[in-house]
Amino acid sequence: MLPKIILIMSLVSLPPNRAFVCLLAVTASLLPAKSATVTNQPTQHEQYMLQIINRTRADGNAEMTRLSSGITITEGPPRVGSNNWTIYNNVQPVAWNTQLAASAQSHANNLQNVDWIANQGTYGSIPHTPTAAFPGGATTPASRIAAAGYVAPTSGYRNVSGLRPGPENIYVSVASPSNGWSLPETLAVFDAGHKNLFEDKTYLGRGHRNTTMYEEFREVGFGTALGTDNHSGIKDTAYLVQNFGKSSVVTDYFLTGLAYNDLDSNNFFTPERTGGSETIPGLTVQARQSGVTVASVAAFDTGGYSLPLAAGSYQIFSSKPMARPTRQARW
């Protein structure tokens, strides 16, 4: 079976609040495969989460329907501070960023290592802003992201109070994995994390939903710590951290997506699939204009890729033979 490639391209931002995304001309072609060791690349489950978030950002209300939420994205209503916040139903996708992933992973590891869920009296009741006793001290999402080397602008669309959604979502789940976090149990945590953060029914202001759908974010990175802390003597804790951003030193525009072998024929990536992986390692993605290569990138081990580009139209070539691609526009 030829693999399936999904290409998503963010091309033009229309100020102040809306985004336009153009469909690319896509060509399958054989190029020499490149190998690269990339730190902080997504795991298969994190790639799965990235696909879900970009599906959500493409149509937030459709995702609410898919989750059987019984609400729309304007439920709440969403607020930032004391003011209402407008969530747009369709915003551009986000591309994986290794610096954001490093920040998120470090924080997830620290939350796990101190068993935060059981020690909030020492480390603080809000995992985004722990106390000085926490590893690394009294940090904030912004300070941790900056420490990882990601340069985020201080400007951007805000409400009348000068506020905007924060750059971090955290999901904490106390579970009882039967086999040291088996694949079904791990997948269930990621699914539950997405549903909990996006619906956000119990969080005043729907801040996690606001962050997921914030139209100015262009990149994201995740951190995952599936614990063996034996919390309360019988359970283990999972920490999922999502760090979003918009870089002030990199283009606003990315070609991002995933090449995968849809062995389940469900039109979606299945992580850590039993009986054969859907990943396509060793893939190179190349962007050309008028037959000239202008940018290329070695994909992650998952088959996911993130390629910064200037606004424009491109032909996209891959290093492996592809069936006719699924092409998607995002508005």
Image (tube, rainbow, N blue to C red):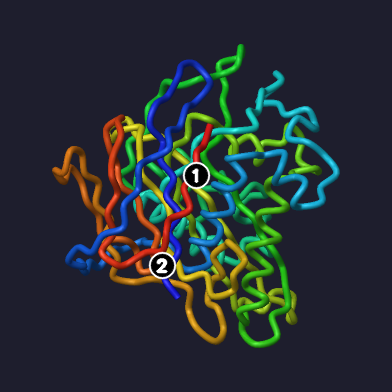
User: Residue 36 sits in which quadrant?
Assistant: bottom left
- Sequence-wise, the earlier of marks 1 and 2 is 2
Query: Which residue corresponds to the image point at 51% horizontal and 39% vertical from the top-left?
Result: 167
Where does the image place residue 260, in percent across and percent down from the top left? Answer: 45, 66
Please give left or right for residue 75 compared with residue 316 in the image: right
User: Residue 314 sits in which quadrant?
Assistant: top left
Q: Which residue is mark 2?
A: 302
Query: Which residue corresponds to the image point at 57% horizontal and 22% vertical from the top-left?
Result: 163
Where does the image place residue 331, in percent across and percent down from the top left? Answer: 53, 31
Which is nearer the eye, 129 or 242?
Answer: 242
Q: Marks 1 and 2, Cα distance to the nearest angstrom? A: 20 Å
Which is nearer the eye, 112 or 55?
Answer: 55
Q: Does the rendering let one see residue 140?
A: no
Query: Which residue corresponds to the image point at 67% horizontal and 76% vertical from the top-left?
Result: 185
Which quarter of the figure is the N terminus placed in?
bottom left
Where does the image place residue 188, in percent across and percent down from the top left? Answer: 69, 69
Crowding around mark 1 (Cα neighbors within 10 Å: few <14, some 14 to 19, many 20+) is some
Q: Which residue is mark 1?
A: 328
Where does the image place residue 201, in percent across and percent down from the top left? Answer: 80, 43
Please give left or right for residue 297 compared with residue 84 in the image: left
Query: Which residue corresponds to the image point at 24% horizontal and 52% vertical from the top-left?
Result: 286
Amino acid at the residue labelled 1:
Gln
Location of residue 328 with respect to 180 vertically, above or below? above
Residue farthest toward the right in the current orientation of the protein: 70
Crowding around mark 2 (Cα neighbors within 10 Å: few <14, some 14 to 19, many 20+) is many
